[in-house]
Amino acid sequence: MALPVPVLPEGVDPAWLPPAAFRPLGGRRTLIRGSGPLVETVHGEVAEACARFGGEVVRAFGPGESPYDLVLELTGPEELGDEGFTCVRRQGRTTVAAHGQAGLLYGLFHVVRLGEKAFSHDRPKQAHRPALGLRMLDHWDNVAVHPVMGQVERGYAGGSLFWADGLARGELERVRAYGRLLAACGINAVAVNNVNVHETEAHLLTDRIGEVARIAGALRPYGIRTHLSVTFAAPMVLGALPSADPLDASVRAWWAEATARVYEEIEDFGGYVVKADSEGQPGPFAYGRSHADGANLLAAALAPHGGTVHWRCFVYDHRQDWRDRTTDRARAAYDHFTPLDGEFADNAVLQVKHGPLDFQVREPVSPLIGAMPRTRLAVEVQATQEYTGQQRHVCWLGRMWSEVLRFRPDGDTEVGALARGGLVAVSNAGDDPFWTGHPLAQANLYTFGRLAWQPDADPYRFLSEWIELTFTPEAAGGAGEGARLRASLGEVLTGSWQTYEKYTAPLGVGFMVQPGHHYGPSVDGYEYSPWGTYHFADRDGVGVDRSVATGTGYAGQYAKPWAEVYESPGTCPDELLLFFHHVPYDHVLHSGKTVIQHLYDTHFEGVEEVERAREVWASLEDLVGPARHARGAERYEEQLRGAREWRDQINSYFFRKSGVPDARGRRIY
Ligand code: BDP
């Protein structure tokens, strides 16, 4: 029996799977061959398209040669793995063949992305399979509303999709619809609660696992495995043991039993996510044990069931002495973890933030990636826009992520290939009607999934796909208006990351945000605090000396060629200069401009670019639908206000520090 396509509540944006995206399946005869729960999902999708747009779907070859337009069959070769598929069109028939059920589902979404082109002319057989086996979203959702952080820590899209009133939601249709969106961009794993595990959330592991099982049940029809963030202190918090020492036999037994019970409830449970010894979370250091001891404890509990532990590497001292210029937070992950290379169990994955600090608008790629050849690493990016405008500003991050994924830490292998443990994003979705607050922030979620499938692909291709699927330009306005819609959306999104960087904290200087919530400028907000995120601006210059010769030595954590490239201001790329060097304001960049003039110019330009984007969005009123348009328009007002605030504060600050006037004579206060 076909599984029904989830029904969205009134007013919820269908995002990149609006009914119109399925129109090309309409009026066609489709044959589906194979059985299993995900095949039923595929059947449900096609049946829904036929109900809406005409056409017919059947489950077996009828007598004689029937003229099928589309065949989706579970007969592909084993080499494709569970998630791969082939697609070919010849003699008027498009055939998708997969070995595994998930592959068939991904194959269907591939056909939807191709649209009419899937049926218009012959196509040679092409095999598709994901480069990375794990393509995951971490939700920083709290079950209970946290007094300071709200429900979704760093969430800008309303409350949690999973939890309401302190419990798993009773109605999970929207969770199923979320699973559908995720599958349509290739995501196959979700962690359903915050990495900061408070007491309520800790119980999800034991007495409240049934709630997690219900969520897992809603995501499963779309091929998504559920994971849980757990606290390292669980044996004490939940089991009343006197210790959580990873080498203690009773602690090991506790984890083994607790984990076995999890698998009784959720057979295909993915595993645990752990933030340990980080920003106040408990961890193995308390017992004089290493992070390999800690991760292996959980890996051992999960191994008999096929689960994985995702052990985060965001380990640093958040109570450092800001007067001590030799300690450097950027060094911490590498210093803690590289000595442990080779000590981690096979089912332990180290989850590394893409940059050494914390999801800034520009950071170098973490030197830890590439420095642990005998360990499985997953790379973590932040789709939720904590430091990039909190989904009130448009900031399409696909290009940034692609630069990370195509970076070659050793000058040879790309990050996308080194991330054998997968690609993970902190989710930007919530119970907001547009899923992501700003409707255009959906593009980040979509692009993330697609990049996790194919990390070396051109990210702009995925942006165009998102625009086509979400706005179906032809359907929205006919050929001429469709082209205008397409071009306008491309214009406001394509360069939005660079625009954001221009009016906030360019040249790799980072932070300068308001402490706590991290929205809006406060140049010295963290400058005299223990968090380790400094810019060291004084009357002579700005930036952090991380060279080996005279600074913190961080640049020396890279392999060649990067250690040399970053070591000297003469070779360091402009966009990272202030991350690696403290330079005078009149230091001349490769671009030929001085640092101070670059700061002034980019801040003026950034605001102008937002003004222009706001106008472009205003011109789309008739084409994007009234509710979506109104939401975007309101956000653009706020983005412009915010961009001006950033411009004025940053420019004034540096003008006053340096005393250097703007070469173009613009007014700086
Ligand atoms: C920082 C966030 C904080 C997270 C932390 C993490 O400000 O809310 O808990 O990262 O990744 O970016 O653990």
Image (tube, grey):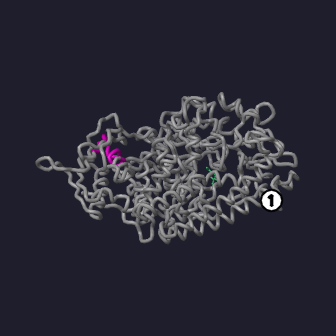
> On the rendered image, what quadrant is the C terminus found in?
bottom right
In the image, residue 329 lies in the stretch drawn in magenta: no
The image position of residue 311, as x and y in percent, is 55, 42
Q: Is residue 302 above or below residue 47?
A: above
Measured as percent of width and height from the top left, residue 102 is found at: 35, 46
Question: Can residue 668 be seen in the rendering of this structure?
Answer: yes
Quadrant where the image shows the N terminus: bottom left
Q: Is residue 306 left or right of residue 149?
A: left
**Residue at 57% in and 45% down:** 401
Q: Position of 508 compared to 539: left or right? A: left
Residue 316, located in which quarter of the rendered image?
A: top right
Left or right: where 241 falls relative to 92: right
User: For the magenta stretch, what is the residue range?
Assistant: 95-106
- Quadrant of res 290: top right
Is residue 484 left or right of 534 when viewed as pictured?
left
The percent coordinates of residue 59 (x first, y second) are 20, 52
Residue 193 versus residue 569 in the image, above or below: below
Label 1 neighbourhood size at 10 Å, few (<14), some (14-19), many (20+)? few
Query: Which amino acid, mark 1?
Result: Arg
Membership of 105 in magenta stretch? yes
Disc 1: which residue: 666
